[in-house]
Amino acid sequence: MSRFGAKKGRKLPGAEFTWEASDPSGEPDTAPTPLFPKYTVPRARPLTATEQLQVDLYRTLRERFHDGPYYSILEGAASASKKDSAARASFDPFHGMPSYSGKYVKKKRALPRILGRQYVMKFFPRELWGTIQPSFKPDAAMDGYVPQGARAGVKRGFEDDEEEEDEETAKRTKTGEEGEGAEGDDDGEGDILDEEEEGQGEEEIEDDDFEDDDDEMGGDYNAEQYFDGGDDEYGDDGFGDGGGGGDEDTY
Amino acid sequence: MTSQYAAELCALLVEDNFGELFARIFSTLQRYDRLSLPRLKFYSRLSDRQLRHGLAAMIQHHLVYHYTSYDDGVTYYQPNLQAAYYLVRSGKILEFIQERLGKYAATLMATIMFLGHAQVGYLETLPELQPEQPKTNGVNGEAEGEKTEEQMNGHDEHSEQPALLHPTLKALASHGYIFRVRDAQFQSYADNALDAERAIKSRPDVKQLKGKKLDETVLEGTVTLLKERLDGDLTRGLMHNGLPRGAKRRHANGSMDAPNKRSRVDYAADEDEEEEENEWSDDDMGGDTTPMELGMVVRVNYEKLDVALRNRRFLDLAELSSSPATRQVYECLLRRIEYQTKQCRDSAEIPREGEEGEQYSVPIALSALTEEVDPQLDLTGSIGPMEISQPVNRRGKRPLEDSVNGTDRDGSDAPSRTYEIDQHLSLLSQPPYNLTSKRMLSGLITWTVEFRHLARKLRHLELERMIEARYGDVALRVIRVLHAKGKLDEKRLQEISLLPFKDLRQVLASMQAGGFVDLQEVPRDAQRQPSRTIYLWFYDPDRIRNSILEDTYKAMSRCLQRLRFERNRLKEFLEKTERSDVKGNEERYLSQAELTLLDQWKSKEALLLGEVARLDEMVAVMRDY
């Protein structure tokens, strides 16, 4: 294919603007690149005294964070794993057995421990106040601050179905979380906190259940039709006087 | 700094410091940016309890912004990338504080960092800030005798403990290294700006305005209101004649004491510091003994610390080309300026190259500087003879003339000393760096530092260093030519840089592949024929700065990932060393092989973390200064 009437022996126009670094003026280099080219690995300079000090200070601070109340991991708290599936399957029979020296092993937290120091409440959003201070009652006025009613009922149309989904997942995680909480207790840390928090959690669960009952049973159960619905069937039997389960029990 | 690698790096840093739960919350927030609690729960797949506790703790550490909107009462959470990034700089900051204000101040700073923000009253109760702490550590498992002794001391310990804590806190506060926490700091800047704007707009006098005037008033009002709300500055009340507390003493004592004291602090920290505290309170003023308000909440002021670290960087630059005495004079000037500089620059982003106006620092009068400089510092030794005023260093002839000059000047000491300091500063003001600049303010000689120019210079030096390391000195020459001359034709470039055609081509092509230079086509006719087109090479420092910044973030996060991998490889062993019985007495419980392994691991970790710290230095130059 000839372009721009290229003649033999002459370069294509634009060839001088080739991208090849190796041969700027001549033909493009089509030879294969070497398989394992020599490569000089750059090496970092050793740390100076100041840098070493900086690193040490960083490490000390990090160590402190790790030993502190907030460092928490996700393992074991992975709510996705059920009691006897994933967690059991990956159990290491050689190192996983509890041993005497296990009591020295550093305990790991699954939840940051919030209690044990004072907080400035006004720096936190209202919905976390209950977490920071378990004694906090959401309805009571605090420091003369009158709570405005949470306008949770107002939904902005577009997130309706998503929210339902949310509730479902929330329920699921909550039930998972109970098992977890028990495990946390086994570890023997954050005990006071756990109990109180659990109480709170359960309340919420009840709430949810109640609502859900409404939703699910709504089709089956209708209080207004309680007598009417039954009467048709039992009336035929001739036991028309009572109607309902109570009478049948006496049989 | 919202890019893929910056986000990755921040998440890694959070994980390295605070564990997986924080990291999960943080990275979820980063991915979706602004979430309410139910949404966050949905995306992060964490339990309600985990989320609530995690978020509370993260807010305590300023890692998460929160904002409760007025319209629907829903609280939204947002990641605070800046705070997460600054986790990497903690080592550097602590080291700096330790050097500047002593070991106890560094401990205090570390404690504040550890707590996120802290009430002064709470700091008072912490055991690690009690002055007796180092002693008990040193004694360790020894006899009871020591303990009773301490108990005897215990009575006055209570009286002297706040005396140590509060002056140190005050010193930190007056330097501006810590500041007061305000409510608004927990919301992101955009939220604050919107809030302030709303507040201004609802004012009755603003409501009557219209059009352009309205916009102007709103903008102006927003800025002032924001400043007012975010401002946690503590330095104002604590400055004493323009000097922060605890700063003056060092020079007043003279140079002989300074190194001496530093070494003393290292081993016998407590007693000496008590002494010093007394010195402080006697020295400065009576008001020093009044403690800080107990209810005040303080946190680390990273912006100010950036200023301090930047000055340090300039000092290193000055040290390259001048004598130690000059460096010390410069240090005094920079420190004086630092006291009055709140942040590295006024705008949030670094302005584009060439569009940046010069922003001079506060001018410092020469006379004030003369007081500041250590009186025993040998100023004459490192500059040329005084009679012939010459700015350039003439090292060869110095010793002989020096002694003559020295005896001459002993009689009239003060004025000549001022003159000498002036000489040192004009030495610094010479090209190529122009580290200082002189101005006359109503007849007074003052010295300033052109920070924007210098910050730019630092950036260029960094880029040039990198180019030289990657492509060699020929490339460096080409880059410098392009930078000085702007866009250049290949032929002109060759003429100016005096390089053979082939070398130039090679170097340009490889640099273009690396993204450091680029080509612009300027067609001479409408057909855009290659033969009738001019090709201009150019070098755009802004563009390169951004890409380098990205690369640096990436390199840092790769370092941290590598560190995590290495740690996983040694997981069993490291867990063993962290056992509560092993920790602290490794020699007793670990075998020889294990001890060497532990040493190796420590140096490996130090190397990787050190590398991250170096890269952070680059990020600071490219982004923060």
Image (cartoon, helix red, strand yellow):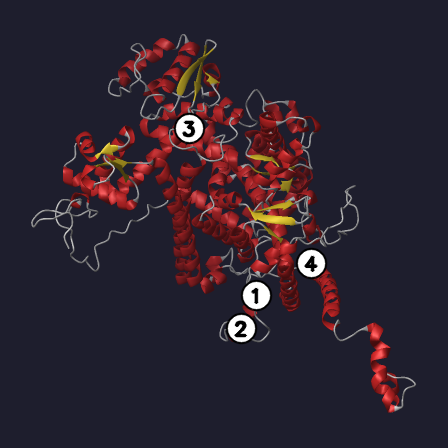
Q: Which residue is mark 1?
A: A78
Q: Nearer the viewer, mark 1 or mark 3?
A: 3
Query: Which numbered marker is on residue B356?
Result: 3
Chain of the residue displaying label 3: B
CA–CA distance in space, label 4 to label 2: 28 Å
The quadrant in which residue B427 appears is: top left
In the image, residue B294 lies at what x, y percent?
Answer: 69, 36
Q: Nearer the viewer, mark 2 or mark 3?
A: 3
Q: Which residue is mark 2?
A: A86
Between discs 4 and 2, the one toward the N terminus? 2
In the image, residue B100 lies at what x, y percent?
Answer: 49, 33
Q: Residue at x 83, y 86 (%)?
A: A233
Q: Are marks 1 and 3 in contact (CB under 8 Å)?
A: no
Q: Looking at the image, which is closer to me, B320 or B252?
A: B320
Tag 1: amino acid: Ala
Q: Are marks 2 and 1 in contact (CB under 8 Å)?
A: yes
Tag 3: amino acid: Glu
Residue B388 lies left or right of residue A134; in this view the side is left
Q: Do callouts 2 and 1 point to residues on the same chain?
A: yes
Count of labels shown? 4
Disc 3 secondary structure class: loop
Tag 2: amino acid: Ala
Q: Residue at x 56, y 26 (%)?
A: B244
